[in-house]
Amino acid sequence: MFFLYQAGIWLYLTGIRIAAIRSEKAHLWLKGRKDQQSILQSLRKKDERWVWFHCASLGEFEQGRPVIEALRAKAPQLKILLSFFSPSGYEVRKNYTGADRIVYLPMDTPGNVQKFLDALQPEFVVFVKYEFWFGYLRALKKRNIPTFLISSRFRADQHFFQFWGSWFRKQLQCFTEIHVQDNTSADLLQQAGYRFSTVSGDSRYDRVAANASHPTSLPLINHWLGGRKALVAGSTWSEDDAVIFPWLMEDWALIVAPHEVTEERIRTIENRCGTSVVRYSTLTDSSPASQVLILDNVGMLLSAYALGKIAYVGGAFGKGLHNILEPAACGLPVIFGPKHRKFLEAGELIAQGGGWSIETREDFLGIFEKISQPAILLEKSQVCQQFVHERTGATELVLRSLLKHI
């Protein structure tokens, strides 16, 4: 079975090389992995002690970040290497100061695995959420290097729990401890024969709660709002546009942060607005009055949520829902599309009365009209803040486990 796994790795690599002819993301994926070994060989100096955190992409990084920073504060003697699989994580966070070195994860082949671990010799390793690189896991187990999976969530339809998944279930034994988000995940692991899981929750709650308490000031947007209430539409795709545009709500403003900040995407939004619109990059205190503001940059969305009253979060009409915890932490009731089954927090927020799943523009308008009433809006805002606050604490539980191994 491991031979078939390795064959799949090589097929994937071949596909990336072909895709790189046309895809900028695939090109970055390959370019970032060039000369990796020379980078790794320069890592260790005498008496340095390294630990390794791995994240697939940006979302997983946000889950791992609170743990990285808590570990840095508790054990400053340790050096931290952070690896990413995807360019969308690496390119955005390659200058993150919380790690001593940030790299692309070398492809999971026997040669790469041996060279990587020989160069780094980590004291322990932390994989975040959904990363199962079985070549690395087997090698770490063989070298007796403590290995953790954190903020993970398992579902009954995953390959680990199918009748044909015995080989995959065995790979779970490579983890020293698995920190899961919920009891359902712990039960699935126990049924699969894994006995070392801990229900710690999701460290993203710690991250978003901390961020929401210290948002970056955005005086230019505050001036643009001019006392109006704002709907903040975060991480939107073209599929979301049909729901939220045109924007015709009197006495409200709309702040849009597209998931892909490209000229083509921004022009599409401008064409669909059907009303006055301005880009943040051209906004000044003297800009003409407008009802829609496009955040044509990266990194401002969380602070924009802090200025809003209601949030719409994109992605759930396509591949999957984006981060609804950031607006909820800021006290914004959250509306999103129908494809959220894999996102535990979405179902829980709906059950608590702070989230709504919609399928049509009519659904959106009906929900918005209801929750925008002042008394209901205040109630739902408190529900969302309490929802996040009650679920903080995962970072501390994970940290206790890690500190036992230094």
Image: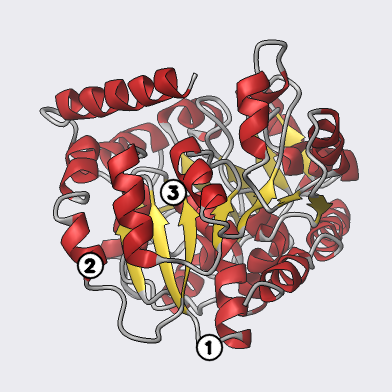
Q: Nearer the viewer, mark 3 or mark 1?
A: 1
- The secondary structure type at the circle numbered 2 is helix
Q: CA distance from mark 3 to mark 1?
A: 25 Å
Q: Residue furthest top?
A: 163
Left or right side of 67 for 353: right
For residue 194, side relative to residue 271 (left or right): right
Q: Residue at x 26, y 29 (%)?
A: 13
The 10 Å Cα crowd at callout 3, few under 14, some 14 to 19, many 20 or more, is many
- Quarter of the image with the C terminus is bottom right
Taking depth in this image into account, of 133 and 228 the one nearest to the observer is: 133
Q: Is residue 188 above or below residue 404?
A: above
The reply to whether residue 15 is visible in this rendering is yes
Q: Amino acid at mark 3?
A: Ser
Q: Name the residue tied to disc 1.
A: 76
Q: Specify which label sits upstream in the sequence, 3 or 2.
A: 2
Going from N to C along the chain, the mark reached first, 3 or 1, is 3
* Labels 2 and 1 touching (C-beta < 8 A): no
Residue 218: x and y in percent read: 47, 75
Disc 2 marks a residue whose amino acid type is Gln
Name which residue lies at 28% across and 43% down.
111
**270 relative to 227, above or below:** above
Residue at 31% across / 60% down in the picture? Answer: 103
Q: Are marks 3 and 2 in contact (CB under 8 Å)?
A: no
Residue that numbered label 3 is attached to: 57
- Give the quarter of the image for residue 210: bottom right
